[in-house]
Each structure stands twice: as structure tokens, then as C-alpha cells.
Amino acid sequence: MTKGCCTPSRPATTPQAPPANCAKRADFDAADDSVEIPGGTALVGTNMPLIADDGEAPLRKTRITPFRLGKTCVSNSAFARFVQATGYQTDAERYGWSFVFWSDVDDSMDTQGIPGLEWWRKVDGAFWSDPKGNGSCILDQAEDYPVVHMSWNDAVAYAKWAGGRLPTEAEWEHAARGGLGDVRFPWGLTEPDDTDQFPCNIWQGSFPNTNTGADGYAGLAPAEAFKPNGYGLYNMVGNNWEWSADPFKVKSLKKQVRARLAQMPGFKLVKGGSALCHKSYCYRYRIAARTGNSPGSTTGYQGFRVAWDIRKAERPYSS
């Protein structure tokens, strides 16, 4: 297991191939679950990096075409339909365990922690429909919550079945900005805090021991919780991490950065932060923030949303 600031990683392994019928397009209209993101000039990164070694800088411009993006991360109920249609088994199910945050683990359970990151527990039997590994079924109470314990491999399989793909970093940031331009958060520049500013689901209190849940949630929130951004997208930051299509790369001459990246071969880019983020510990619930994880890794705060291309016949791109 590899240490990571926010998202612990499994060692690199080769996942089993998903069932052949995962390649079939799902029997639903993407427009029902997504919003159209306008094309044009997209901003990526920032000229005011706060975790410089993650490759947040510089602010740069790129051109993208219009696309559709899930208005929320994929929910438990949506993923359940995928599993029912295909018989797909997630990486967490294949491995037989996943990472669960300590406060989500039953006291009676015998679990293994990561040295130096003991708040992450290796829990046998934890996977998407039993996220705590205690035999309970999430579908009984949280159909509208984001599906978690998702690996990059799982996200790609679902997206392919749904006729889509994972968003690139440029698409994700462009969508997260919601038309506001060079802003730190999807809602603008106002900083969330522990007392009265709650625009997203992050940690309030002293990490990792005390979460006051002042924003209404001490763990995950429903996929449509909180106010959407200017494009109608919910929870682009906070709540759960989101996989992207891109590899995790950082251009740096620093010896310590290059050494860290050498231990992360094949890692995929992860965006958005989670409900466990706090400014004092993991200030990655910013649009430009970024991290990486191995494609087979899963945690109780790791999900994804789907992007769809817009065919030229449907809506020609114009500048």
C-alpha cells in the first residue's frame, strides 16, 4: 500500500477484464442525467498555486468543444442498474477489501490501518453496496448518494456502458468554473469555513478526530446536495473525489517531486476533494487542486461522473 495525503493507494496490479456486455450502450438518454457544457476557451490551473508540488500552476488556456457532463456523480441507484444489466464486479469486490475512513468503521470490526495514515482502515468486505463492510446494503437508505469505492477501472467500465467516458482535466475544470472564469471554487472566491460558510461538503473541525458536521453532513451527502454551479453541476468539489481520464503528471525539476512521481507509475488524475478535506490538512477542494491514485485503488470517498461527446450532427461547434 502506498501513502498518499488524501487518497491511499493499492499497489499496481492488472485488473480482470470486465464482462463483454459492459461495452454495450446503456438504454437511457444521457440528456436525462447531464447538462451541456459550452465549448470555447477553457482555463486550467492557477497562477496562485497553494500546493505547488502537485502541478497546480501555471494558469493556462486551451480550446475545447462542447460536451455533456453528468450533473452529479454517478449514484448508487444508477450503478446498481449497471451491475444488474452486466453482472460487473468492481475492483473492491475482486480484491475483497477497500479503504474506509475510521469514523465509518464499526467499533467491533478488526481492521488494519496504514502507518502514518491510521485514519484509513483496510476493511474486508467493503465495496460499493456495502461501503462500511459491515453487511449493510447502501441501497436500502442511500440510493441518491454518490457511488463510492470506485476504482478508475470501474469508472471507465461504467462510462463505456453508458455511452460516454471520463472527463479530461481541462473539461472538468472548465465545467467546475461554471462560467465564472478564474475563480478558486465553483461558486466563486468565498472560502468555506467551520462556522457559517457551507457551499460544499467538506470537513469542519479538527482533522482527523473531530468533524462537527456543521454543513449538515459528517460524511457523504446526497449527490444533489448543496447549490449547483452556474452550469447546473452539483458537488464539483467536496463530498467525494472524482476520477478523470488523464494520467497524473507534474512538470517539475524538484528532486523530491520527481522521486514522488517515480513511486506513482500509471497513476490517474483525481479532482475535486472530498468530505474529508479541510484547509488545515488537505486543501484540495479547489478547482485547480489535483492529486493522483493508482487505477485499481478504492476508498469510501472515491467516485466519478461521466462525460459525453456531442456529435457534430447534433450541435455543430462554433467559436
Image: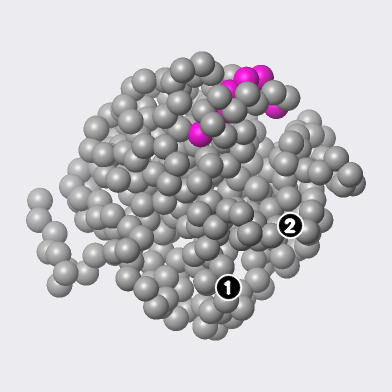
Residue type highlighted by circle 2: Ser
Residue 97 has which mark? none
> Residue at image x 30%, y 45%?
232
Q: Which residues are magenta?
A: 201-208
Residue type highlighted by circle 1: Val
**Marks 2 and 1 in Cβ contact (< 8 Å):** no
79 shown above or below 188: below
What residue is disc 2 on?
136
Inspect the magenta stretch and tell me whether residue 158 lies in it.
no
Locate residue 187, reporting x and y percent.
33, 30
> Residue at image x 58%, y 49%?
302
Dot 2 or dot 1: first in sequence order is 1
Is there any visible trace of residue 13 in the rendered image?
no
Horizontally, residue 299 falls left or right of residue 214, namely right
What residue is disc 1 on?
83
Dot 2: what SS? loop
Locate residue 15, reporting x and y percent.
66, 68
Is there any visible trace of residue 302 in the rendered image?
yes
Locate residue 299, reporting x and y percent.
66, 49
Most extreme residue toward the top is: 195
Most extreme residue toward the front is: 140
> Residue at image x 36%, y 20%?
190
Dot 1: what SS? helix
